Image (cartoon, rainbow, N blue to C red):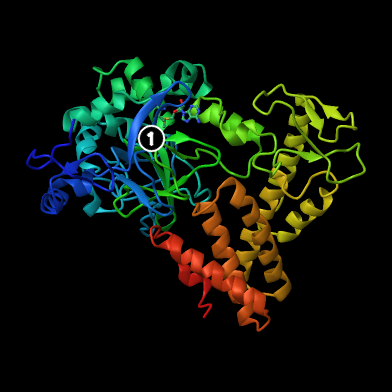
Amino acid sequence: MPSLCSVCSAPAAQRCAGCQQVAYCGRDHQRADWKAQHRDQCRRFKVVRNDRLGRHLVATRHIKQGEIIYRDEPYAVGPKIANVPLCLGCNRQLMALRSPGQSDRFYECSRCGWPLCGASCEEAAQHRPECSVLAASGYRPNIRPNPANPEHRESAYCVIVPLRVLLLERLAPERYATVQTFESHLPERLASPLYGVLRSNLVPFVRQVLGLERYSEQTVLQLSAILDTNCYEIRMPERHVKVRGLYPLGAMLSHDCRPNTKHYFDDRLRMVLVATVDIPEGGVIHASYTQPLLGTVQRRLALRQAKCFDCTCARCTDPTEYGTSASGFRCPNCRRATNLVLAVEPTNYRSVWRCQNRRCAYQERAEQYVARCERLQQELLGLNRTEPAGYEQFLASNQTTLHPWNAYILQAKYALTQLLSSTRQTKEPSESATRRVVELCRDLLAVADRLEPGYSTFRAKLLLELGAALATLQALGVLSEPERQEWRTVRGELECIAKTDPTVDVSSVGDSG
Ligand SMILES: C[S@@+](CC[C@H](N)C(=O)[O-])C[C@H]1O[C@@H](n2cnc3c(N)ncnc32)[C@H](O)[C@@H]1O
């Protein structure tokens, strides 16, 4: 059937180049429709479903690296299950009010008594609807400044985001109905200790304390499970807090351990999804729900625990993890340091681990591998996080057993770059420490090229560190000509990334000329 113009229903000769979903009889109607509505509706993706991923997004046309795929308005934003004290109006970390002779306290909302920044936040759109429910309950949370432990998290906040979603039933019923269709994994979650706590604390709080008895225990727990499965963490360093947000398109985004997108949150807390690499028409658009520098067992366990599924993506099923062998270690039986021990069946937690050298018989059981990983994890956690020497020592002492791209080695290298870079900002930078950052960044970038390629947040951070270190070498007067060329290349790439990612501040890498 020939396409019809979206505006006048005449036969249409041209389609929107963006989404290929709508057609027009000519440029005038296309332009008019763009202004009237299509600018907001033009989509580069559609939601589809399959047995492995459930609902997920696929590209309806070729999406270019760096392109913004969507901006998603949140359905609800607010504190995590336990949060440092934050303002329910503007999500900022709270500052204590000091009055002589009295103990410190926070400003409290004149109606509901929950802590806020000040009077202006009482009227914030985010707080108004819940304020009357909280006020009517008569419950006053005892949230006080805790100078001895400023990181202390208050569990009273666990009720706020569920309440904000429940209030959508009256304020935005179509949104509330959409949330009910989101994945929850409730049966698996009910078996976890957290859901035992929610059943005995959150449910009575919502039903008895807030008087919302029309919501059954099942509804409240189902909603908690929907939030745990679909919310994104929003880091707001400038507000010194992390909160969580529920996004309708974010709730459709599937996971892959080598993602082709990244996201950031704009000043309206919209989730902006950006393609980090080219995505072909028909390709799955995915994000990573986990960290790139974890081995396969640790990533899959984290995904199972937080999101209730067993990942079988290309990285998880490939014993070499795109050629990094990040989960592997050096064979203790072979003289050649390049012989690695890798999982025989990477997606089986019971898998045997075997030396890749066919002439070597070395193998170890899954339990031995897990014990090895736990030892390394403990060793890393025990390091002084303000002292580079401990990380250098970790790298030196493990170099005979672990190869340079083993996940624990990579974690130590990344921590070291962060530490050396932050030291450079406070102390007079030395050439040797700066050259060490350059070396570590180059090494980590080669890993990032395989595990989170393109314009990923991980690569952008490393490029920023590398660019800043090269700028320091220039300031110290020791930058070589090849390094100057590298500095220019790094800056050029960061400028491309920054075009659609305002979180990337290219000025920090200096002017490479
Ligand atoms: C944010 S939701 C994504 C939308 C969901 N698929 C749906 O149909 O509503 C997250 C859930 O999607 C599923 N999922 C996402 N990525 C997956 C993957 N790589 N493999 C298997 N399941 C995945 C899991 O059930 C996960 O808990």
Residue lying at 36% horizontally and 51% vertically, measured from the top left:
68
Please state the horizontal and vertical placement of residue 86, each as a whole percent of the image: 37, 47
Q: Quadrant of ligand 1?
A: top left
Label 1 crowd (10 A; few <14 / some 14-19 / many >=20): many
For the point 61% across and 81% down, which residue is it? 475
Relative to the observer, which residue lies in front, 448 or 291? 448
Q: Is residue 44 above or below residue 455?
A: above
In the foreground, 243 or 51: 51
Q: Quadrant of residue 9?
A: top left
The residue closer to the viewer here, 77 or 160, is 77
Q: Of residues 212 and 415, which is closer to you in this image?
A: 415
Residue with the mark numbered 1 = 57
Residue drawn at point x = 67 percent, y = 65 percent: 437
Quadrant of residue 225 within the rendered picture: top left
Residue 150, image x, y percentages: 49, 50
430 on left or right of 359: left
From the top left corner, tell me how far across and down residue 198 is, in percent. Answer: 43, 23
Query: Residue 120, position in %: x, y?
Result: 22, 54
Q: Is residue 473 above or below residue 155?
A: below
Count of marks, rendered view: 1
Q: Secondary structure at mark 1?
A: strand
Task: Determine whether 110 is above or below 417 in the image.
Answer: above
Query: Does label 1 point to a residue whose CB lies under 8 Å from ligand 1?
Result: no
